[in-house]
Amino acid sequence: MIEAKGLTKRFGGTVAVDDLTVTVRPGVVTGFLGPNGAGKSTTMRLILGLDAPTAGTVTVDGRRYAEHDRPLTRVGALLEARAVHPGRSAYHHLLALAQSNRIPRSRVLDVIDAVGLADVARRRAGTFSLGMEQRLGIAVALLGDPGTLILDEPLNGLDTEGIRWVRGLLRDLAADGRTVFVSSHLMSEMALTADHVVVIGRGRLLADASLDQLVADSGRSSLEEAFVHLTADAVEYRGGRR
């Protein structure tokens, strides 16, 4: 599981994440919601050790990400789909990552098939559409067969068929007992995908509840209405980083 305790990140005078304490548990899809500038991406970067916290701690399975041996086999992440050399093929991008974590070559072929990129695996990634880049990013996250998945806006650029595929994938991963933590600005999609939601605004925790409980407590009829109501005092925030 993912555990954040008093997690805080400041960039100069801007507080991007503010004393965040939350536990993301296995076996359910946890949606990570908040308005632009709420601190979602910064929180995910802190989990993966890409930013150092100003205060507090965050661990995956009781350890900081950097303390895990062969981290791709423990945590799979998609933060930026375009984080691949444009001249390298999808296959060789995945192969290089696999070799760095002692993951068998056969696993590369498995995830390429799983994400639907078999026909373009030898093409340069720089020629990929946004949807294909997203599929490659998901393949990277799945490469080590990890117990924890962290996905930042994985639905961006996907068509209707691709969105349905990701929805089913996330549910299957959670049903397999994995920890699935996914951010999205598509409230209607999260209502169909997430079992539990964590909502932040201005870097602070606003809600940590099952989807049904959040909607019921808000007195609204949908996740989108509950989200707008909950974040009413945060939607105008534009400082810091998302």
Image (tube, rainbow, N blue to C red):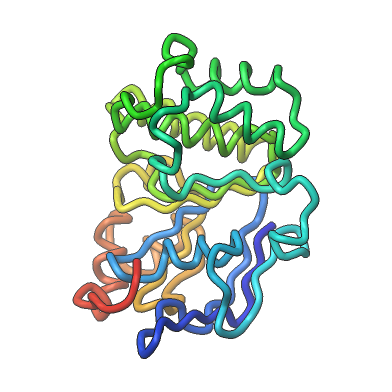
Q: Residue at 73% across / 39% down in the picture?
A: 101
On screen, residue 195 versus residue 222, left or right, reads right
On screen, residue 171 versus residue 58, left or right, reads left
Q: Residue at 45% across / 38% down in the picture?
A: 84
Which residue sits furthest left? 236
- Residue 179 versus residue 216 in the image, above or below: above
- Residue 135 versus residue 146 in the image, above or below: above
Residue 197 percent across, percent down from the top left: 47, 59
Viewer-proximal residue among 113 and 205: 113
Q: Quadrant of the N terminus?
A: bottom right
Viewer-proximal residue among 85 and 111: 85
Quarter of the rendering containing residue 13:
bottom left
Viewer-proximal residue among 126 and 138: 126
On screen, residue 4 versus residue 67, left or right, reads left
Residue 94 percent across, percent down from the top left: 58, 29
Residue 180 percent across, percent down from the top left: 57, 47
Quarter of the rendering containing residue 160:
top left
